[in-house]
Amino acid sequence: MAAQQSSDIVIVGGGIVGSALAYFLLSFDDRKKVTVVERNLSGFEGSTGYAPPGFVGQFNESEVLTRLAIDSVGEYLKVPGGFDHVGGLEVATSAAGLENLKWRLETAKDRGLEAELISAEKAADMAPDLVKDDNVSALYFPSDGTANPPTIASFFRSEARARGAEIIQAEVTEISRSDGRVNGAMTSSGFINAQTVILATGIWARNLCNFDIPFPIIPVAHPYMYGERHETKPYKSPFVRYPEHHVYARDHGSFFGLGSYDHRPLPETPKTSAHGSWVKDFDKTLDRALKLIPGKTNLVPKEKFNGIFSMTPDNMPLVGEIPGTEGLYIAAAVWVTHAAGSAKFLSQMIKGEPIDATVQKALDPSRFMGRDIGSLERESLHCYNSIYSTYEGS
Ligand SMILES: Cc1cc2nc3c(=O)[nH]c(=O)nc-3n(C[C@H](O)[C@H](O)[C@H](O)COP(=O)(O)OP(=O)(O)OC[C@H]3O[C@@H](n4cnc5c(N)ncnc54)[C@H](O)[C@@H]3O)c2cc1C
Ligand SMILES: *[C@@H]1O[C@H](CO)[C@@H](O)[C@H](O)[C@H]1NC(C)=O
Ligand SMILES: *[C@@H]1O[C@H](CO)[C@@H](O)[C@H](O)[C@H]1NC(C)=O
Ligand SMILES: *[C@@H]1O[C@H](CO)[C@@H](O)[C@H](O)[C@H]1NC(C)=O
């Protein structure tokens, strides 16, 4: 299919972020012409298609991310089959871990998020297959749940299309600029004129970012596994995280899933899929993680894979205008947890609507200006092992 010759807005990338952007940009103002350019429309070959855990834990050390997550859940609840309100558990296995949960409980409540500190017995009652009933305590977030990223992204795509968005399959090879502003995108099926271009290219963000400022968006490898099939349980367990062990697990209905960050961070150079090759060391990572799961569950890996997502030096997404090129925006390193909220925020910025200055500052893509890319990359990788503790840059 040949690309149309001109558009008001071009969005590069049709994962959950690019699709949500098209949806929000056309929500109230259908007069704009919006074109999404995605290299593969057959499925979701980006991180959106390889994020089966779909955990949406709304509480975050960063208040900005907490707000974006609450906003995102509000949107996901409107998507048929998009969100399962199962609740979330954070489980502590040590005295220090428990202290951390207490801090998180108070902070969550201050931010208006419902949370409750519960005993080992109660936690094991809620998630008997995933939590041992001795010597742990847990923080329960009843309003958390699991998202189905491809279902949500497909919904945003089709709603955007119904409102006039053009969604085409092509590879964007270059962003075209002149006199300090963007004027279009070169694609494998021709040039598209546009005064506004948004990069929603996930782990590939840096490929098109040959601008004068550093873009520390570092793709990393991450192991996830599925267990053997099991009978559907008569109860729905909350998803479970073990922050001290960098491990998380959930019930997918007819099998369990488990992932871990407890390994040396591994940068990746993705080709055209967020599905990477299996890393041999990940076997040991999963074995260690499985020790946390009750023996009676008999959870053993049936299928395992390496899914690639992005890290940044401060664990915060990059969402906003790219300085030095008027009309050029980015929304990258955005988790499913914050995708709808971030896309809504950026669409408001682009439409010239009032936006929250605190959010703008925290997500500002120019916040790494003047920093050396080598040390930014190291900081991003370092963040991988502290993924359950994020702090807002000051
Ligand atoms: C194993 C795994 C587990 C995860 N678990 C969770 C979780 O529990 N909770 C959570 O919130 N998040 C989770 N994530 C992260 C989440 O999946 C991503 O943050 C999110 O999907 C990113 O969405 P995106 O739209 O920015 O990127 P993508 O889905 O990668 O979309 C980018 C799109 O851009 C396209 N593209 C790139 N370059 C070009 C180009 N030049 N021309 C045309 N098209 C282009 C790609 O084809 C792709 O479709 C997980 C990720 C993985 C891999
Ligand atoms: C496009 O996506 C589909 C479905 O995810 C996949 O099977 C196919 O290999 C992809 N095509 C290319 C060219 O990457
Ligand atoms: C588990 O037991 C140890 C040793 O008795 C104790 O120090 C720790 O606080 C307990 N952990 C929790 C989460 O209760
Ligand atoms: C806070 O958000 C960041 C960025 O998405 C994420 O890496 C981190 O895991 C989140 N923290 C918690 C406790 O969920």
Image: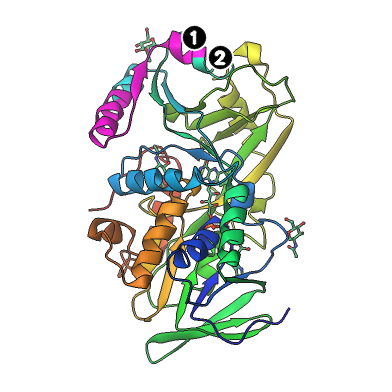
**10 Å crowding of disc 1: few (<14), some (14-19), many (20+):** some
Q: Which mark is residue 374?
A: none
Q: Which mark is residue 133?
A: 1
* Foreground residue among 345 and 255: 345
* Foreground residue among 284 and 35: 35
Would you say the residues marked 2 and 1 are in contact, meaning their CB atoms lie under 8 Å apart?
A: yes
The answer to whether residue 109 is magenta is yes
The image position of residue 46, as x and y in percent, is: 62, 56
What secondary structure characterizes most of the magenta part?
helix
The image position of residue 216, as x and y in percent, is: 43, 62
Sequence-wise, the earlier of marks 2 and 1 is: 2
Question: Is 127 situated above or below 224?
Answer: above
The answer to whether residue 390 is magenta is no
Quarter of the image for the N terminus: give it.
bottom right
In the rendered view, does 15 fall on the left or right side of 228?
Answer: left
* Foreground residue among 334 and 345: 345
The residue tagged 2 is: 128
Name which quarter of the figure residue 168 lies in: bottom right
**What kind of residue is marked 1?**
Asp
The residue at 57%/71% (across/down) is: 164
Instruction: Please report the bounds of the magenta region as a residue range.
Output: 100-125
